[in-house]
Amino acid sequence: MRRKLDWKRLAPEGVSAKRELAYTGVALAASALWSLGTLGRLGKEFDALAPQAAQGKAVALTGFQGILGTALFGFYLTAIAMVFLAMWHYAKLGKAREKADAPHIRALAVPALGVMTALCLSLILTLVYHGLFLENRGRLEEIFNRAYGAGYAENGGGINA
């Protein structure tokens, strides 16, 4: 037999857990959209460096932290906001006339879920962006090696040839 979720037990009296979860979802979605700037930075770097690599010129590559930039800050700010939400919940519980059952669950359910989701999403996106970063580096290296190898063969295979 399946029990129905009691939303009133997930937030202090007078607070809508559904609404808080919806706002948390909106904050996480906005954070995900903000993080897409990483893809733009990767594309710009490739577009700027690919012609130079194709000519066999050495290129200066931006490190992963430089490409990532502030992409994950939205998730971190959401997690920090969840800490303040938990403090507000505890303040609401302290002012309540009747003592709530399981006060810690009421105060921490939504904030804990928000923090865990924000940190998990930031970890997943870090891994995805790092994979794309390495793939971008591999493509640039392949272009450079093709051009450098062609130039190497044209010169008779080396300096002393």
Image (spheres, grey):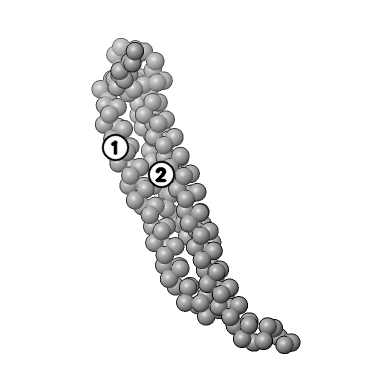
Residue 149, x across and y down, in percent: 60, 77
Q: Quadrant of residue 15?
A: top left
Q: Which residue is mark 1?
A: 23
Say what secondary structure mark 2 lies in. helix
Q: Nearer the viewer, residue 144 or 21?
A: 144
Helix, strand or loop at mark 1: helix
Task: Report crowding for label 1: few under 14, some 14 to 19, many 20 or more residues within 10 A (C-alpha).
Answer: few
Q: Residue furthest right?
A: 160
Q: Position of residue 61 (x, y in %)?
A: 53, 67
Q: Quadrant of the N terminus?
A: top left
Give the vertical position of 116 relative to 47 (above or below).
Answer: above
Q: Residue at x 29, y 27 (%)?
A: 17
Q: In the picture, which quadrant includes the C terminus? A: bottom right
Rendered residue at 47%/60% (across/down): 67
Q: Is residue 4 visible?
A: yes
Along the line of sight, the residue nearer the viewer: 13 or 46: 46
Q: Which quarter of the figure has residue 9?
A: top left
Q: Position of residue 130 (x, y in %)?
A: 51, 54
Q: Amino acid at mark 1?
A: Tyr
Mark closer to the chain start, 2 or 1: 1
CA distance separating discs 2 and 1: 13 Å
The image's mark for residue 75 is 2
